[in-house]
Image (cartoon, rainbow, N blue to C red):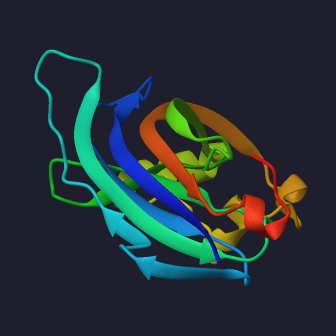
Amino acid sequence: MAEVHIIGTLAGASGFPSSQLRCKWRIVAGDGWRLIEGDVEGSTQVDMPQASKFTAWSHPLDLHYATKTVTGWPKIQVQVLRRDWLGRDELYGYGFTHIPTTPGEHKLEIVTWRPALSTFDSLYSWIFGTTPTLVNTDLVHTPTDRFRLTTCSMGKVHLNVGIILRNFEGYGVAM
């Protein structure tokens, strides 16, 4: 079988209204992909920088997949959360990007968005410390019905990954 190694870090985030953030992440791959080793989801720690607008996580990623197809190539989905002074998590953004298909090191930026709030929703959110979230987060990386959402742009998540490909030529895939 052909193999893909994904090794890297969720470096951090920038461009968000607050820098006291954490990130929940998940790697999504198609049915023809088998995870050999590694975690497909996780969460970073909360970084609370004092002077910087950059939130640093340096959270490791290390996955090893086997496949016989390039259909369903892995992608990473992120959910950025802000920790408020009461210890509650507020949604700051969703985003995703495809894992690169070329071997080597890659610096990626995942642009994030969140559901837009009406004036009433903004007031409700401020009073109760809640924000609207998606019931099914698969909507983040699949185009089905995503066009119906009203969203606003948020910041970027910075991802550094190294990709190692093995045995793709034996399956008729020239990389």
Q: Nearer the viewer, residue 152 or 71?
A: 71
- Vertical arrangement, residue 155 with respect to residue 7, above or below: above
Nearer to the camera, 77 or 87: 77
The residue furthest top is: 51
Count all numbered tags in the image, as a single digit.
0
Relative side of 61 to 96, left or right: left
Q: Is residue 122 above or below residue 69?
A: above
**Residue 31 image offset from top left, x and y in percent:** 73, 84
Q: Name the image quarter holding residue 145.
A: bottom right
Q: Can residue 168 be spotted in the picture?
A: yes
**Residue 129 seen in this snapshot:** no
* Residue 24 percent coordinates (x, y): 39, 61
- As displayed, is residue 64 above or below residue 162? below
Taking the spot 48% from the left edge, 59% from the top edge, the residue there is: 5
Quadrant in the picture for residue 9: top left
* Rendered residue at 35%/56% (across/down): 61
Residue found 54% across the figure and 32% down from its top: 108
Q: Which of the 4 image quarters holds residue 129?
A: bottom left
Where in the figure is residue 18, as x and y percent of width and height?
A: 32, 31
Identify the image quadrant of the N terminus: bottom right
> Who is closer to the viewer here, 59 or 166?
166
Q: Nearer the viewer, residue 159 or 113?
A: 159
Q: Residue furthest left?
A: 50
Examine the rendered structure and indicate whether residue 102 appears above or below residue 108: below
* Residue at 28%, 52% in the rendered image: 60
Q: Picture coordinates of residue 132 (x, y %)?
A: 56, 62
- Asked if residue 147 lies left or right of residue 75, the reply is right
